[in-house]
């Protein structure tokens, strides 16, 4: 079987065109950086064009200086410059300029069903997950108990 790798760079222009025209573009994130919220192969997100400066907790789709595409959460926002971090990470990515932002997540789909981003469960998740102390404790416990299997 010949598996061709899907490269977002091949569709960058199309994504931007759809978002600029007021449309939504659905992507299926790969990788583990947004676990436990987004699971590769199971979840997808709809992107829209940002309407102004992003806010803390927004999930942004952006391009790094090295050309890689990333879907991470806004941790800090100041004058169009952002600090980002994946939910499954503790290392901050600082000084992301607004010009690098392609889109912002407007909807999450879990197993192809809409996920309530305004519900109590998601708000509690954000409250707890924003604490890097709790996140580090969780990762440490996961490593300890994961090794026992």
Image (tube, rainbow, N blue to C red):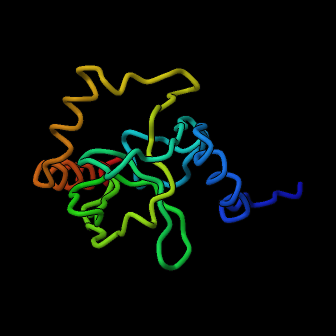
- Residue 84: quadrant of the picture: bottom left
Quadrant of the frame with the N terminus: bottom right
**Residue 121: percent from left, percent from top:** 26, 23
The image shows residue 107, relative to residue 33, as above or below, that is: above
Q: How many marks?
A: 0
Question: Compared with residue 144, is residue 112 higher up or lower down, i.e. above or below?
Answer: above
Position of 109 with respect to 74 (left or right) is: right
Say which residue appears at 28% left-offset and 28% top-offset. 122
Q: Residue at x 69, y 62 (%)?
A: 7
Q: Is residue 18 left or right of residue 56?
A: right
Q: Residue furthest left?
A: 133
Q: Which residue is at the far right?
A: 1
Residue 141 in picture, x, y percent from top left: 20, 50
Q: Position of 133 compared to 19: left or right?
A: left
Between 82 and 69, the one nearer to me in the picture = 82
Q: Is residue 112 above or below residue 26?
A: above
Residue at image position (52%, 38%) is 45
Residue at left offset 31%, top offset 52%: 53
Q: Is 108 placed above or below 146 here? A: above
Could you say which quadrant of the image residue 144 lies in? bottom left
Observer-nearest of 40 and 54: 54
**For this view, does 120 lie left or right of residue 68?**
left
| Residue 149: x %, y % from top left | 36, 47
């Amino acid at each position: 079987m010949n598996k061709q790798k899907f490269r977002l760079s091949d569709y960058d222009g199309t994504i931007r065109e759809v978002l600029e025209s007021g449309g939504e573009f659905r992507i299926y994130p790969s990788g583990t950086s947004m676990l436990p919220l987004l699971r590769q192969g199971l979840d997808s997100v709809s992107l829209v064009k940002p309407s102004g400066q992003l806010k803390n907790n927004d999930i942004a789709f952006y391009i790094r200086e090295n050309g890689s595409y990333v879907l991470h959460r806004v941790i800090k926002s100041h004058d169009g410059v952002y600090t980002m971090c994946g939910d499954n990470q503790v290392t901050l990515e600082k000084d992301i300029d607004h010009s690098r932002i392609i889109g912002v997540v407007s909807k999450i789909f879990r197993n192809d069903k809409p996920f309530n981003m305004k519900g109590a469960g998601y708000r509690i998740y954000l409250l707890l997950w924003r604490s890097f102390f709790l996140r580090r404790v969780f990762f440490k416990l996961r490593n300890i108990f994961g090794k026992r299997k």
